[in-house]
Image (cartoon, grey):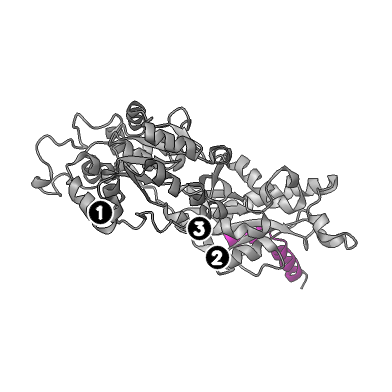
Amino acid sequence: NYAEAFCVPEGKVLAIGCPQADYYFRKHNVQAIRERLERQFPQLKGRKLALYAPTFRDDEQRDRELLSHFDFERFERECGDEYCLAVRLHPQIQSSKVPEQVPNLTGWPDVRELLLATDLLIADYSSIAVEYSLLERPILLYAFDKKWYLDQDRGFYYDYEETAPGPILTTMDDLCASVRQQSWDIGKVRAFARLHNDYFDSHSARRVAEFYFPPGCMGAEAAPEGADVLAGGENVPKGAETFVNEENQRKEKIQNMKIIAGLGNPTDKYKGTRHNVGFMAIDKLSEALGIAVNQHKHKAMTGSGFIAGQRVLLMKPLTYMNLSGESIRAAADFYKVEPEDILIIYDDISLDPGMLRIRKKGSAGGHNGIKSIISHLGCDTFPRIRVGIGGEKHPGQDLADYVLGHFSGEEKEKLDEALENVVKAAELIAMDEIDEAMNRYSVGKKKRAKKNEEV
């Protein structure tokens, strides 16, 4: 799963555990953590801590309204004698308002301390349950929007319902009843922990350090007797030594992500229309590069892979054309991609069908999708490929009707050739050869070259 997620061969994934998880295998003064929490949040005194930790929905409105689906007053009324409910929000949904009477633990500096002090975790689809399962304590999943969330194709690696660490509850009735009746199953929690934490123990950080640093450089005191080491200990996971040998020989340059996004409108209603030529280009790139665009992330359908060793993310924003910038900005922030490394492919009514125009930067030229991207990025210094759809040849037709219409048979033939050239141009641009792409495929460059020849 890691190999697929990060687009690398399986042999390049070293299964040596997660250093952060070492924390849960050590002794801690949980009472001291509780006392610090109670000093800041007196409501916790004398009660067990139930922590509600929902994940983000990747939808601004749903994220903003997320907590409105949790009846805090009812929980306090029905379960408050035994449990004090607190909230820990995902960083991407802190715009959601936590009621004043509810302890808001979002700002607590170490989530691991919170989990140690938590008696009952109420999660939804969040990976926080993976860490918490190591403690073998009760977990409930409050998934009020389960149908919607699962329909978004969020890319689960395991069946959500079959592998759940606890009851999946879709209403406050069921949630409160489960808390009162203690209808959780620690056996499911243990099975969930085994599924996700096979390589977790108290020595993951050591194995990582010993992989990167030569033997002896950490000092003798850093290797207590009995500690498992990467170079030959019995507890080294299968395949680690092979990986080390390969990694020692590896000379590849690790490169940052680049984004290639095609603009369009979602749903079948707009499929194949002139305004969706950007989506068609991404489909063509997906086919040519063998990159499946089937992950729903950053308000887009995405897929990652490589072009000549350069890691790329293919994107089809699902925000509708006029809000394309929301999706592009979200992906750029997540992968820390500069505007110069974001290639946008979109339709241009000023060009004949089959023509391409490639630019390193520029204004929106009246295109609402580009306006949105410029607004959200705060600049226009991103490269773009404009694909001609020939709108200027139909002056008597309403512009909206035209761009949302379908290509004629003759136009489709020209479009097929144009999309083949888009693939070639995008590959060159991903390899930092935009000047070459402009010279080969941009109509503007060709016209200027021809004019110079005539002179």
Say whether residue 397 is left or right of residue 28: right
Q: Are marks 1 and 3 in contact (CB under 8 Å)?
A: no
Q: Are marks 1 and 2 in contact (CB under 8 Å)?
A: no
Place of residue 36 in the rendered image (x, y in percent of width and height, measured from the top left): 22, 55
Q: Is residue 445 magenta?
A: yes
Q: Closer to the camera, 178 or 294?
A: 178
Callout 2: few (<14), some (14-19), or many (20+) C-alpha neighbours within 10 Å? some
- Kindly report the distance in space between the C-alpha atoms of the residues bearing marks 1 and 2: 43 Å
Between discs 1 and 2, the one toward the N terminus: 1
Question: What range of the chain is rendered magenta?
Answer: 433-453
Secondary structure of the residue carrying tag 2 is: helix
Q: Are marks 2 and 3 in contact (CB under 8 Å)?
A: yes
Please name the amino acid that badge 2 sits on.
Answer: Leu
Callout 3: few (<14), some (14-19), or many (20+) C-alpha neighbours within 10 Å? some
Q: Is residue 354 magenta?
A: no
Label 1 vs label 2, nearer the camera: 1
Residue 9 in sight from this viewpoint: no
Q: Which residue is mark 3?
A: 332
Label 1 vs label 3, nearer the camera: 1
Place of residue 346 in the rendered image (x, y in percent of width and height, measured from the top left): 68, 56
Callout 1: few (<14), some (14-19), or many (20+) C-alpha neighbours within 10 Å? some
Vertical side of 154 occupied by 99: above or below: below
Q: Closer to the camera, 143 or 150?
A: 143
Say whether residue 233 is left or right of residue 291: left
- Kindly report the distance in space between the C-alpha atoms of the residues bearing marks 1 and 3: 39 Å
Q: Which residue is mark 1?
A: 38
Residue 232 in sight from this viewpoint: yes
